[in-house]
Image (cartoon, rainbow, N blue to C red):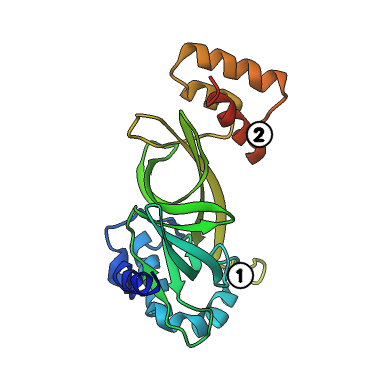
Amino acid sequence: MKNLFYSLLSILSVQLTVAQYSGQVASNLTTGGSSVGGVSAQINTLLGPTYERGEKLKNYFDEFQGSPYTSNEFRPTTMFYNDENLGSIYYRHNALNEEVEIKKSNLEEEPIKSLTRDKNISVLIDGHKMSFKTFVDAKGRTMNGYLISLLDGAQYDLYKRTHVKFTEGKPATSSFTKAVPSRFSQFTEYYFQKEGVNRMDEITPKNGKLIKLISDATAKEKLKSYLKENDLNIKEEADLIKAIEYLNTL
């Protein structure tokens, strides 16, 4: 199994290049005048290949507020191909470019690779599987990115997405104004999918919006009553999970 793991790891992971981003995933960049593609390319050019990023990250992102990573440090995890356990690795999630960087060990000299965006591959995040998915956001845009499976239910599945947007800073225009630093801002979204429906939709964090997403009239009314009687607000993750768990009992 160990040899199989390392063989698959070599196949499933590739060295990152700037060209890898082109046309594959919708970008999470917002800018103050530059093109989205230009800012993305600029960041990746400055950082260079994945295996060179360790030292550059220590200095380059000091100039910015926030980080493109959910954690700048590599963390231990388990990798799966479908339900097959492929063993332990270390990962770091770049939520700006929807990329998972991986290493076989946490040694500094260990080369960093980028996990290929294969939807059959998943890694464990706090006991939940994270994998590459296609989904529809609140604006109706079809997107690709990494989602964490919070709930795998009989009728409804619930997913969580952490993503990062980059906003380019602005220099001070006079001695009376302050410069605005470039920043990475982190956001959380939730998505659900109904059994038998080949579509995953974002849940706007309002009780009424969730109710509208339910197509079955009886389930819709029961959910409305359940949320009110239990004083639940799906802006809170724990309450959202309870709501989806309840839907799975109907």
| Residue ID at (53%, 22%) | 211
| Residue ID at (57%, 71%) | 72
Q: Secondary structure at mark 2?
A: helix
Q: Which mark is residue 174?
A: 1
Q: Which quarter of the figure is the N terminus placed in?
A: bottom left
Residue 218 falls left or right of residue 198: right
Q: Which mark is residue 4?
A: none
Which tag, 1 or 2, sits closer to the chain's start? 1
What kind of residue is marked 1?
Ser
- Looking at the picture, how far across and down is residue 65, in whole percent? 60, 67
Callout in the foreground (1, 2): 2
Whether residue 60 is situated above or below residue 96 in the rendered picture: below
What kind of residue is marked 2?
Asp
Q: CA distance from mark 1 to mark 2?
A: 48 Å
Res 61 visible? yes
Res 171 visible? no
Q: Secondary structure at mark 1?
A: loop
Count residues near mark 1 (Cα–Cα under 10 Å), then give few for <14, some for 14-19, many for 20+: few
Whether residue 245 is situated above or below residue 107 in the rendered picture: above
Comparing 189 with 169, the one in front is 189
Comparing 217 with 78, the one in front is 78
Residue 179 falls left or right of residue 53: right
Residue for badge 2: 239
- Looking at the picture, how far across and down is residue 30, in whole percent? 45, 56
- Report which quarter residue 194 is drawn in: top left
- Report which quarter residue 50 is drawn in: bottom left
- Looking at the picture, how far across and down is residue 55, in whole percent? 52, 85
- Looking at the picture, how far across and down is residue 243, in whole percent? 60, 29
